[in-house]
C-alpha cells in the first residue's frame, strides 16, 4: 500500500501524520493503512435516516469482507453537526473514523464530489478510485451475505 510512507497519490488523501479513531475512542495512525489494498471511505451522518439504515448492513458486510480480506479497511467521514452525535454513531461502527472536526473532511468531500449521503467510495492501495457505487454493490449483494462484494470492489466499473 504505502509501506509506512504514503505514496504520492495516497498522500493526497491521507497524510502520513493522519490520525483516526475507532468505536472505543482509541487513536490509530495512518500506518495502520500501510498493508491495505482496498479502502472504503464512508460519508455518512447520525442525523441521516438512510445512513442509519445502511450502516448496520455495511457493518455486516465489513465483518464478512474483513474476515476474508484483512487488507481491507473502511474510514468513516462524518457529516454530523456535533461531536456527541458523532461519538454515538461511531460507537456502532467496527471500522475507523476521521475524528470529528478533522481538517481533511471538507477536502475529502470535495475530492469525491459528495453531494448526498450515504456515499461509500472504494479506492485501491495507491489511492486510485475504484468505485463510487459501493453502497449499491453492498445492497445488491445482501442476499448472498456479501460473499461477492470483494470481487465487485476489485473491478473498476
Image (cartoon, helix red, strand yellow):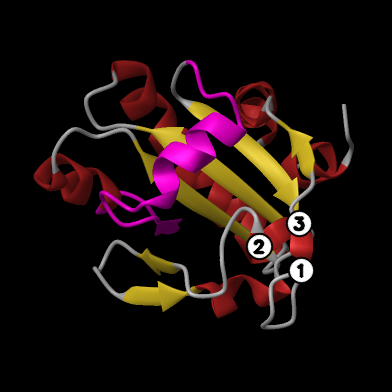
In percent of the image, x 69 and y 80: which residue is there? 5
Q: With respect to residue 154, does 110 lie above or below?
A: above
> Which residue carries the number 2 mark?
11
To which residue does mark 3 refer?
9
Magenta region: 91-115
Identify which residue is drawn at 41% across, 44% down.
105
Q: Is residue 61 visible?
A: no
Instruction: Report if the CB atoms under discs 1 and 2 are less than 8 Å apart.
Output: yes
Query: What residue is at 63 percent from the left and 64 percent from the top?
Result: 67
Report how far apart the C-alphas of labels 2 and 3 lie in the structure: 5 Å
Q: Is residue 127 left or right of residue 49?
A: right
Q: Are marks 2 and 3 in contact (CB under 8 Å)?
A: yes
Residue occupying the far left of the picture: 84
- Left or right relative to 12: residue 147: right
Relative vertical location of residue 153 with respect to residue 5 in this rendering, above or below: above
Which SS class for mark 3?
helix
Question: SS for tag 2?
Answer: helix
What is the total number of numbered labels drawn onto the structure image?
3
> Label 1, on which residue?
7
The image quarter in which residue 81 lies: top left
- The location of residue 155, given as percent across then percent down, is 89, 38
Percent position (x, y) of residue 53?
Answer: 36, 24
Amino acid at each position: 500500500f504505502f509501506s509506512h510512507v504514503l505514496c504520492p497519490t495516497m498522500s493526497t488523501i491521507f497524510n502520513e501524520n493522519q490520525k483516526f479513531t475507532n468505536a472505543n475512542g482509541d487513536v490509530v495512525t495512518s500506518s495502520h493503512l500501510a498493508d491495505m489494498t482496498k479502502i472504503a471511505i464512508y460519508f455518512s451522518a447520525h442525523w441521516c435516516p438512510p445512513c442509519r439504515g445502511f450502516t448496520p448492513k455495511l457493518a455486516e458486510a465489513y465483518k464478512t469482507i474483513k474476515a476474508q480480506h484483512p487488507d481491507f479497511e473502511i474510514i468513516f467521514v462524518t457529516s454530523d453537526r456535533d461531536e456527541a452525535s458523532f461519538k454515538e454513531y461511531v460507537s456502532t461502527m467496527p471500522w475507523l473514523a476521521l475524528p470529528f472536526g478533522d481538517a481533511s473532511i471538507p477536502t475529502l468531500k470535495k475530492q469525491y464530489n459528495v453531494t448526498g449521503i450515504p456515499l461509500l467510495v472504494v479506492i485501491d492501495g495507491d489511492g486510485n478510485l475504484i468505485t463510487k457505487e459501493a453502497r449499491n454493490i453492498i445492497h445488491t449483494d445482501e442476499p448472498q451475505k456479501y460473499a461477492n462484494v470483494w470481487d465487485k470492489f476489485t473491478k473498476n466499473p
